[in-house]
Amino acid sequence: MSITTQKSSKLKPKSKSRFSIINAWLHLWLGLASGIVVFIMAITGCILVFEHEIKSMTSPWLNVEAQSPEKILPPSKIYAVVKKALPTKEIHGIWYNGLDKTIKVNIESDSLIYVNPYNGKITGMVDHEDFFHEIDEGHRHLWLDEEIGLQITAWATFIFFFLLISGLILWFPKKWNKTGINNSFKIKWSAKLKRLNYDLHNVLGFYALILAFLIALTGLIMSFHWVRESTYWITGGFTNEKEKKEVVAETKPDTLSKPKYDQLTAADIIFNRVRNEIAIKNKQAVIINFPDEPKDNFYACTDMHNGNWRDLYFDQKTLELLPSSRKYIGDEKFHDWMSRSNYSLHVGAIGGLTTKIIYFTASLICASLPLTGFYIWWGRKRKNKKN
């Protein structure tokens, strides 16, 4: 063999493995197939991250000057105010949102009533089908029929989760030298559009990878029962059958006895008990829902903080706290903490404004990936046609 032949054989690039070829092929075509759905979900997710902050700034009827907790009107007073203004409407629940926020009253229509918690004046009547409601509809089921749209977004999330894994494999540097590290971790801003677009897809995708995994996984937990059950089991749930039975145990109401209190008096008692004896976080934010049926119990919600909340159930007749009520989230075991924190982990509220900003940035990068990925494919397709 000649020296020239030896040199040419050394310079010949190694052929890709079958796994690499299949991985690249799946990443390309699954990415093209799910790109539009992923883009819509990511962009709407960006908007929804700051829903409460934007509403607070743009909706004056949501804010009031904070006063002492003793001056807050009880549910019976708020009920009377709304009932007087709208006598034909049935009131389902009263949402106290804190000392500096108005009370939201849920009535049997697509409207929400907002009431000043200190003087009982109605500050606004807002259509429930507002801008953020429409954005949420797009995020969850693409403004389609729920039965169809939820399936599309669920499986698009599943594909996106796989694309993150296949993308990590494609990103992984072949050589950990200076050139390989720069190509994988740095964006060459001075490069031409084609190279810059590739870096935006490759490098930004890597930096957003951990949060993208978390957003996708928590979305899958919401979408698929088997993912939810599997995650709960992996994190240590379902290990004690006795404990599991105690969680689902319900107390059967005595149908022969009559309630000691009417519903409004009972609501006042529960409201004061929750914020003064039970609540730990954000004590002045309490939701009281009235029973729809005589056999139903009172529902209350408290400890609403950073995307988490605590469900409480009270016997309608005795007003005793039922065993099916949730514990404070800080007292939960890890698997139950994970299960209850899934929503806050999905929307980025787990750490307050700081994590919301980080999640917004990650969601924006996720929205860009289908666009930059499509441009990479389109550029290569055009190049192949020219050749």
Image (cartoon, helix red, strand yellow):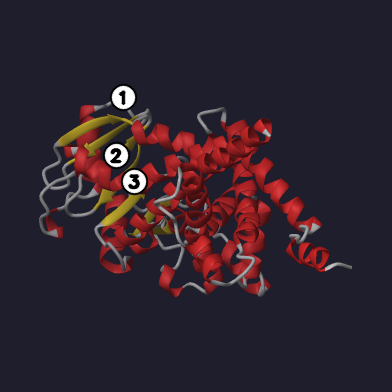
* Residue bearing mark 3: 263
Secondary structure of the residue carrying tag 2 is: strand
In the image, residue 233 lies at what x, y percent? 65, 67
Q: Quadrant of the C terminus?
A: top right
Secondary structure of the residue carrying tag 1 is: loop
- How far apart, in angstroms, are the residues tagged by discs 2 and 3? 16 Å
Q: Quadrant of the rendered structure where residue 136 is?
A: top left
For the point 54% across and 38% down, the residue is 375
In the image, is 98 to the left or to the right of 379?
A: left
Front: mark 3 or 1: 1
For the point 30% across and 54% down, the residue is 286
Q: Does the CB distance between marks 2 and 3 fall below 8 Å?
A: no
Amino acid under disc 1: Thr
* Residue bearing mark 2: 105
In the image, residue 18 lies at what x, y percent? 81, 56
- How far apart, in angstroms, are the residues tagged by discs 3 and 1? 18 Å
- Reply above or below: 258 against 206: above
Amino acid under disc 3: Gln
First in sequence: mark 2 or mark 3? 2
Numbered circle sitting on residue 88: 1
